[in-house]
């Protein structure tokens, strides 16, 4: 996992812990100070390929962290 992938994952986990539901890619992008959502989306595509996360296509707030215990 790259530094940026870990950072994005940490932002998502912190958001879920704080609010009780998953953030959108736009919200993660804003929290990471990125101008475009596509950068964050690509980070999460790689994380999905590695088995760390999943989400439902075309549905908001469906991001799920799969390997949460391994992140600590």
Image (cartoon, grey):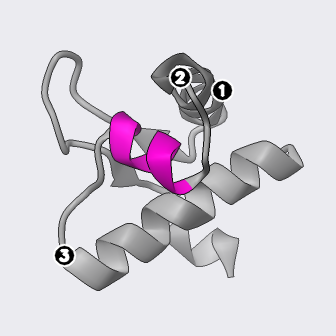
Task: Report if residue 12 lies within the magenta region.
Answer: no
Residue that appears at 56% across and 32% down: 40
Q: Give the mark nearer the N terminus: 2 vs 1.
A: 2
Q: Is residue 61 left or right of residue 14?
A: left
Label 3 sits on a secondary structure element that is loop
Q: Check disc 2: other Cα within 10 Å, few if <14, some if 14-19, many if 20+.
A: few
Label 1 sits on a secondary structure element that is helix
Q: Quadrant of residue 51?
A: top right
Q: Quadrant of the N terminus?
A: top right
Residue that appears at 33% across and 51% down: 64
Mark 3 lies on residue:
20
Q: Quadrant of the C terminus?
A: bottom right
Viewer-nearest of labels 1 and 3? Answer: 3
Q: Position of residue 45 (x, y in %)?
A: 56, 23
Please tell me the numbered disc located at residue 13. none
Viewer-nearest of labels 2 and 1? Answer: 2
Q: CA distance from mark 2 to mark 3?
A: 25 Å
Residue that appears at 30% across and 34% down: 55
Label 2 sits on a secondary structure element that is loop
27, 46: nearer the viewer: 27
Mark 1 lies on residue:
46
Q: Give the mark nearer the N terminus: 2 vs 3.
A: 3
Please tell me the numbered disc located at residue 36. 2
Magenta-colored span: 25-31
Q: Main secondary structure of the magenta part?
A: helix
Q: Give the mark nearer the N terminus: 1 vs 3.
A: 3
Give the total number of marks visible in the rendering: 3
Q: Is residue 24 above or below residue 6?
A: above
Extreme residue in the left direction: 59
């Amino acid at each position: 996992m790259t530094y940026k992938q870990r950072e994005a994952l940490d932002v998502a986990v912190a958001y879920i812990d704080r609010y009780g539901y998953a953030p959108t890619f736009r919200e993660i992008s804003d929290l990471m100070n990125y101008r475009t959502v596509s950068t964050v989306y690509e980070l999460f595509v790689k994380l999905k390929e590695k088995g760390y996360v999943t989400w439902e296509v075309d549905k908001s707030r469906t991001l799920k962290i799969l390997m949460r215990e391994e992140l600590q």
